[in-house]
Image (spheres, grey):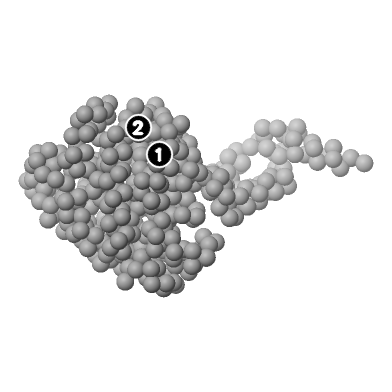
Amino acid sequence: MTRIEQAREGIITDEMKAVASAEGVSAEKLASDIAEGVTVITRNNLHDIKPLGIGKGLTVKINANIGTSKDKVSYDDEMRKLEALVKYGADAVMDLSTGGDIKGLRNALMKKSPVAVGTVPVYETIVQTVEKHGHIAKMNPDDLFAVIEDHAKEGVDFVTVHCGITLKAIERLREDRRILDVVSRGGAFLLEWMIYNNKENPLYEQYDRLIETAKKYDLTLSLGDGFRPGCLADATDRSQIEELVTLGELRDRALEAGVQAIIEGPGHVPLNQVELNIKMQKEICKGAPFYVLGPLVTDCGMGYDHITAAIGGAIAGAAGADFLCYVTPSEHIRLPDIDDVIEGVIASKIAAHAADIAKGIPGAIEKDKEMARFRKNLDWEGQASMSFNPDRVKRLRGESPPGMAEVCSMCGEFCAIKTVERALNKK
């Protein structure tokens, strides 16, 4: 039985109890939400990791992407990135590799990762197709489903599958005349295959086959937004909404079959449309967990897009998004290095935490209260321990001039905290 089937039968597993305890919710409520498809636990039944709960009433989770490209292949670098993203608090990792021994890297990742692992199987399928036949259009749909099965057999916890791109949606895209037509790599692969072959998307046309594989391993389907907006001017247009409606319908079919699903969302979205996008998804997809890339609230943040995404992510999380995909300073520029990964994770963690406070998640603000108490007492070790990057706080603190053991070099003897304490204690 899958988790959804167990929850429908009123079976509360040890896994559900563990997630409920970690989140501070009742196991009965968690099970009910899993049965309704508004919460998922992303763990393949072959993967021995701490289960990850994503969805209604739970803390906002974050994912960090790693992986090789054809131009840069270093398995050691990717393993170091994994260690860093785990250290700084990522809840999940996605392997987006398109270069080198993709399967070998994934197997190493599965062995080393203590957090949930996601993949995009169409990447590996297309790389294999181009290596064998020279062109994306030569992809055999059976090969795609075979790769999905391989990922599931290896213990992958969730897979991004761009099921909402249809021939009808491509015609809509042509009519919309976007500035940036499609920026999703997986979406672009499938679109090219469909146009060259004049055939329907196999992930849509053979969706029942996909469900069958997912059910076998309790694999979570992350229904990818292949037509997510790649710039502000394209946000919340008809192509995006048409795909979202399709994803909502496919999510219902997965739920009926007992398969967990989450919905992926934009993308580049103006600040004033972020909340609208979240609420619209929740309505169209009946409260399914929402996984967003950012959203990035300006197109001009190159070099600082971890900040651009954190702004959008905080608003999205507060409005109801459940899962944030991090963005690094190298977004739109290059393959991220380990420092980029750390910056991306921390920016996303800040956004998720801010959202949890805004949503009133039990206990979320307690960390901030503790930070305030440490700050009042000028307890620098305590303040570092409450930060998202204690190492950096200690390094910056260590660069202060001599004689600044108690206060900071910004205010020195004019420290507001010491001044007020002195005044209030005056007799």
Residue 35 in the image: state x and y as whole percent.
Answer: 39, 63
Q: In this view, does 164 lie above or below 260?
A: above
Which residue type carries mark 1? Asn
Front residue of 339/1: it is 1
Residue under label 2: 235
**Residue in the picture at 42% in, 72% down:** 10
**Residue in the picture at 29% in, 58% down:** 254
Residue 180, by quadrant, is top left
Left or right position of 57 against 164: right
Alpha-carbon span between mark 1 and mark 2? 9 Å
Q: Is mark 2 on a helix, strand or loop?
A: loop
Q: Earlier in the sequence, mark 1 or mark 2?
A: 2
Q: Can residue 381 be seen in this view?
A: no
Q: Quadrant of the N terminus?
A: bottom left
Q: In which quarter of the image is the C terminus?
A: top right
**Residue in the picture at 16% in, 51% down:** 205
Query: Label 2 crowding class (10 Å Cα cut-off): few <14, some 14-19, many 20+?
Result: many
**Residue in the picture at 57% in, 50% down:** 360
Q: Do the residues labelled 1 and 2 touch (CB within 8 Å)?
A: yes
Residue 213 in the image: state x and y as whole percent.
Answer: 22, 62
Residue 211 in the image: state x and y as whole percent.
Answer: 24, 60
Residue 350 in the image: state x and y as whole percent.
Answer: 51, 44
Residue under label 1: 277
Q: Is residue 238 above or below residue 30?
A: above
Q: Can residue 423 be seen in this view?
A: yes
Which residue type carries mark 2? Ala
Query: Label 1 crowding class (10 Å Cα cut-off): few <14, some 14-19, many 20+?
Result: many
Q: Which mark is residue 75?
A: none
Front residue of 324/375: it is 324
Left or right position of 104 against 94: left
